[in-house]
Amino acid sequence: MKKAILGKKVGMTQLFLADGTMIPVTVVEAGPCPVIQKKTEGRDGYEAIQVGFSEMREKLATRPRKGHCEKAGVKVMRYLREFKLEDAASYEIGQVIKADVFAEGDKVDVSGKSKGKGFAGVIKRWNYGRGRKTHGSHSYRATGSMGACSYPGEVMKTKRLPGHMGSENVTVQNLEVVKVDAERNLLMLKGAIPGAKGTMVAVKSTVK
């Protein structure tokens, strides 16, 4: 059965097992996430649920968002995400999904927005080699030759060039749930996940 929840990346720490083994873990504040909307096969063509995370002040929310949340009978949520689950029909509007939906040992995929690096050159962005520093060369970190001389005489599409780096949706697959703290709504996942501290992430049952 597939499960999913929204959360916030708190940071990284480490846990020690009974045999003294140290495990690096990422702490995620997972939920509580109320179900705000249900998609059905008859009305929408597929089954899914829309959940919210992180309450926000009503005066900061748009009127459509306030009306959408009030219709479900929940407080205004900052983040809304939709999950296609096999048992979506079993969820009810207003039902709250908490961190204990996952158990220790579960395998999950975590999706989030990676850290933004700003404008970057090809060496940092694509791991290009630098130019030589001899024989009068002054192009140490420049892109260099990018196209053919005569035909087709243009820079081809998909050429790796300088540009904006990071701030992309990234998914890390097959992470293990090391510990679940249901009272504090915390999940501890083995390894690293995308984004900086405070980034909103989606934790879902792994697809592999």
Image (tube, rainbow, N blue to C red):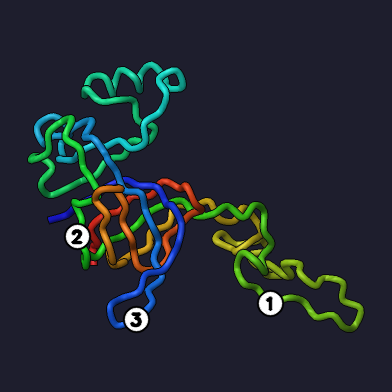
* Residues marked 2 and 1 touching at CB (< 8 Å): no
Q: Position of residue 167 (x, y in %)?
A: 53, 51
The CA distance from mark 3 to mark 2 is 22 Å
The CA distance from mark 2 to mark 1 is 45 Å
- Disc 2 element: loop
- In this view, 23 is above or below 157: below
- Name the side, left or right, on which 47 lies relative to 13: left
Q: Nearer the viewer, mark 2 or mark 1?
A: 2
Q: Mark 2 highlights which residue?
A: 103
Q: Quadrant of the C terminus?
A: bottom left
Q: Quadrant of the N terminus?
A: bottom left
Write the residue at 64% across / 55% down: 163
Q: Nearer the viewer, mark 3 or mark 2?
A: 3
- In this view, 68 is above or below 133: above
The disc label shown at residue 20, or none: 3
Identified by mark 1, the residue type is Gly
The CA distance from mark 3 to mark 1 is 42 Å
Identified by mark 2, the residue type is Ala
Q: Mark 1 highlights which residue?
A: 129
Camera-side residue of 90 and 134: 90
- Disc 3 element: loop
Q: Position of residue 65 (x, y in %)?
A: 35, 23
Q: Position of residue 57 (x, y in %)?
A: 42, 23
- Disc 1 element: loop
* Residues marked 3 and 2 touching at CB (< 8 Å): no
Camera-side residue of 9 and 148: 9
Q: Earlier in the sequence, mark 2 or mark 1?
A: 2
Camera-side residue of 109 and 207: 109
Identified by mark 3, the residue type is Gly
Q: How crowded is the residue under tag 2: few (<14 C-alpha within 10 Å), some, or many (20+)? A: some
Q: Position of residue 191 (x, y in %)?
A: 39, 68
The disc label shown at residue 54, or none: none
